[in-house]
Image: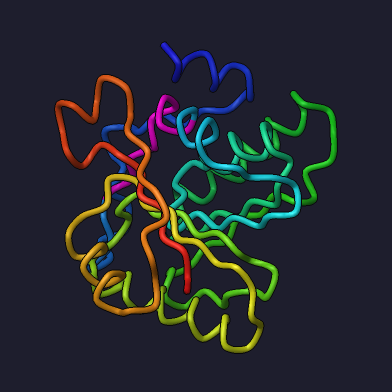
Amino acid sequence: MKEYYYDKLFNINTKASGNNKGENISHYHPYEPTPYIVLEELLKHYEINKEDTIVDFGCGFGRLVFFLHYHSQATVKGIEVNKRLYDMAILNRKNYRKKIGKSIDNMHFYNGKAEEYSIKPEENRFYFFHPFSGHIFRKVINNILNSAEKKTRPLEIILYYGHEDYIDFLERSGMFVRKREINIPYLSSQNSYEKIIIYRLQ
């Protein structure tokens, strides 16, 4: 129900199709959008404002990008390796712009591999819904750490449905501290993965 409501509100289509695998790229997982109920809980318990710049790795059709842009006016960027999904995100961006009738200069999508994306000095929050293997995740986190060495700033990692390989790497690195966990109503009690974990760079 929420999927229909928000997609209609934003004038977009973010529902995963049966053919969502796209290119056969090693270490990358099929597209699955973050449920809107999870995004609602994120904003209830985690402050995001217009001074923040959030990067969504494996953004697919851009659901998180549109949701956060609409509700927080933050700068939001989506990185997507699959060209077909990226093209759909761009179409969604055009339709969203028509619906809301205001500037979307602080919304961007990039087509390419996450580990090859150059972390920008203004980017301070990074979102992952298990879009790729732990091998790629480690490369992306190292890129974030390299960026932090060049420009010191508060950095946070947002994991939804975080798997052990992601969590183990962050906690064994000694660089990040677990800031908080956000449980999802009705879901977390049935599945321990159904939660959001926030890590802060020390």
Determine the image quadrant of residue 47.
top right
Please state which of residues 176 and 2 is positioned toward the viewer in this rendering.
176
Please state which of residues 145 and 88 is positioned toward the viewer in this rendering.
145
Give percent across and percent down for residue 92.
Answer: 60, 36
Give percent across and percent down for residue 35.
Answer: 38, 30
Up/down of 87 relative to 185, above or below: below
Q: Decide whether residue 94 is among the magenta residues.
A: no
Please state which of residues 70 and 198 is positioned toward the viewer in this rendering.
198
Give percent across and percent down for residue 31.
Answer: 33, 45
- Magenta part, dominant SS: loop
Up/down of 93 relative to 202, above or below: above
Residue depicted at 58% across the width and 28% down the height? 12
Which quarter of the rendering shows the N terminus? top left
Determine the image quadrant of residue 186.
top left
Relative side of 9 to 161, left or right: right
Colouring chosen for the image of the structure:
rainbow
Give percent across and percent down for residue 128.
Answer: 39, 54
Q: Which residues are magenta?
A: 30-39
Residue depicted at 61% across the width and 39% down the height? 68
Relative side of 68 to 172, left or right: right
Q: How many labels, in total?
A: 0
Determine the image quadrant of residue 108.
bottom right
Looking at this rendering, what residue extends furthest in the right direction? 102
Residue depicted at 35% across the width and 49% down the height? 197
Up/down of 83 relative to 154, above or below: above
